[in-house]
Amino acid sequence: MSLQKQNSYRTGPDERGHFGIFGGRFVAETLMPLILELEQAYAAAKADPAFQAEMDGYLKDYVGRPSPLYFAERLTEHLGGAKIYLKREELNHTGSHKVNNVLGQIMLARRMGKKRIIAETGAGQHGVATATLCARFGLECIVYMGAVDVERQKPNVFRMQMLGATVVPVQSGSRTLKDAMNDALRDWVTNVDTTFYCIGTVAGPHPYPMLVRDFQAIIGRETREQMLAAEGRPPDSLVACIGGGSNAMGLFHPFLDDAGVEIYGVEAAGHGLTQLHAASIAGGRPGVLHGNCTFLLMDDDGQIQEAHSISAGLDYPGIGPEHSWLHSVGRVTYLSATDEEALAAFQLLSKLEGIIPALEPAHAIAKVMELAPQKPKQHLMVVNLSGRGDKDIPQVAEILKDRHT
Amino acid sequence: MSRIDARFAALKQEGRAALVAFVMCGDPDVETSLAIIKALPKAGADVIEIGMPFTDPMADGPAIQAAGLRALRSGASMKKTLQVVRGFRAGDAATPVVLMGYYNPIYIYGVDRFLADARAAGVDGLIVVDLPPEEDEELCLPALKAGVNFIRLATPTTDDRRLPAVLANTSGFVYYVSITGITGSASADAGKVAEAVARIKRHTHLPVCVGFGVKTPDQARAFAARAEGVVVGSALVEAVRASLDGEGRATAATVDAVADLVADLAAGVRGARAAAE
């Protein structure tokens, strides 16, 4: 893949849903008519001021936006370099950035007259956000979750059930997020007339990567305004963790054409890149899965490999197609953090700032710990704190307990 | 004229529908699956669909998912699938062979190399579930150029407006997916299927085969009365599974278990037109 000079990095996808060679609509024929209908419905909603106004109302009063941009003074002092700001997406209702996208999709589903909502979830954050908005709007909600994840993210399973959702533990394949997505697609194919598939990340068939990005881009737009208000200029660098990559895309996209802004995505390196991990760009290559062409972890025969990350939300062998493209054109730098590095960052942020991050953004914090000391003191670095760590406390406590005994 | 065209033309002369039999390559192991495939024509299969195993078969139900995983565990791969086709072709020059599966293993093998090797091995057609007409440039158009039929799925959601696009680059036959759903699930109502087949036939001269949810000789007979072919898959891979020993290995009964079921289904298909008249 050659580096090519772009006039703008923000014009994708093309009308066929492609970002360069990535993206597309690789789905069964049964789903194609609905995907085309969704594309039309989204175009109509986008052009409708009433849709945007209604969304803005819920974003403000139900989600609690704007989320603060917080100067992490003690973390900054501790690392002794760049001035670090946290974009506090973990303060949103439901505890993560996922709600931004779910609100948009649920409002689309209502416009399309769909009363049954399905979703896949890894850590359970997308599932909780979907269950929450289905409760709010009186819609049936079915969440597919890998049986392994049901076990390691129990608090979120209870939360979804409390909200009235049905959680289906997925027993096929590796019983994690990838398999939850397979089963959600199987449900969708079966119930295509009644059902809206609320995808949780910037992946899947076109138009999902585009519309999820658009719904999440509020993160980056707010960040720009807030940083201008705080410092009188835009940030110098952005850092975010990446599983499918929706929180990262939401932060990055409004800044892609700001040539002076360095952008870092952080994948999950699990036990390390030579062992089991979930870093699709670092360890994968382009392939086709779940409706799109993108970087995937797979063997020489094109069989998808099981990913591993301590974080259920990053435990996926693929990545959103627009990230694959931004990597191939060199606009975004993709790094990776191991389970151990994320655990250390999880503890550091808790102790220095009184903010317990989810294990997912702990991966981003881990790379901030490397990047910030290399930067001058006037360098403004924003890290997306995409979710809070409450859901991870039982799992982390278990891991740390084993170490102390 | 391709082997598929020739076979359907001959069956039209006979006045009966085709039995299209699907088995997963490498299930439960490569050698046994070759033995099963070799036994299919004699048992009454008119067209053979060979599944290319994939870890993430998003349009398949539990039976075919499990068959694919058994195959992958036994060391199946695209290379071995093509070897099996070559092995079958060495003893049978007439029965059409269609490979069915998902795009990623083909993409990784390399489209041009795959088409050349598939054609050389004796593959006549391809069914790739996750390549709708919107992605024709990926594989469909290169396949047509290479002389390999590209068989498209039409579904209950493919309406009259969309049918022309679906049929445009389709060759060999049209595979009508009788339900909105995954393989091996609920069975469609024969009346509704007849309507759908008639609707497709208003748009094409290609033979129409009906699949998804066909399990018994009676169902096969009912659909065969209305279409040029009936596809059976999940029931056959279930027969494989039921014949295995405690460790999932083939037994002396495995090949016969599939062949016997194919013979019953073939009898159903062959009885259809007589019953309809």
Image (cartoon, rainbow, N blue to C red):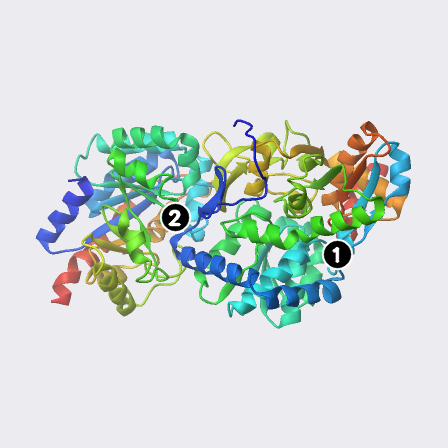
Say above or below: A196 vs A364: below
Disc 2 marks a residue whose amino acid type is Glu
| Few, some or many residues within 10 Å of mark 1 (<14, 14–19, 20+) | many
Position above or below: A264 against A17 = above
- Where residue A347 appears, x then y in whole percent? 84, 41
Chain under callout 1: A
Q: Against A282, is A154 above or below?
A: below
Q: Report if the CB atoms under discs 1 and 2 are less than 8 Å apart.
A: no
The chain containing the residue under callout 2 comes to: B
Vertical comparison of B264 with A256: above or below:
below
- Which element type, helix, strand or loop, lies under badge 1? loop
Relative side of B173 to B158, left or right: left
Residue B134 circle label: 2
In the picture, the quarter occupied by the C terminus of chain A is top right
Work out whether disc 1 and disc 2 sit on a shared chain: no
Q: Nearer the viewer, residue A137 or A404?
A: A137
Examine the rendering and report whether any part of residue A401 can be seen. no
Q: Residue furthest bottom?
A: A138
Q: Nearer the viewer, mark 1 or mark 2?
A: 2
On the picture, is B119 further left or further right than A24? left
Q: Amino acid at mark 1?
A: Gly
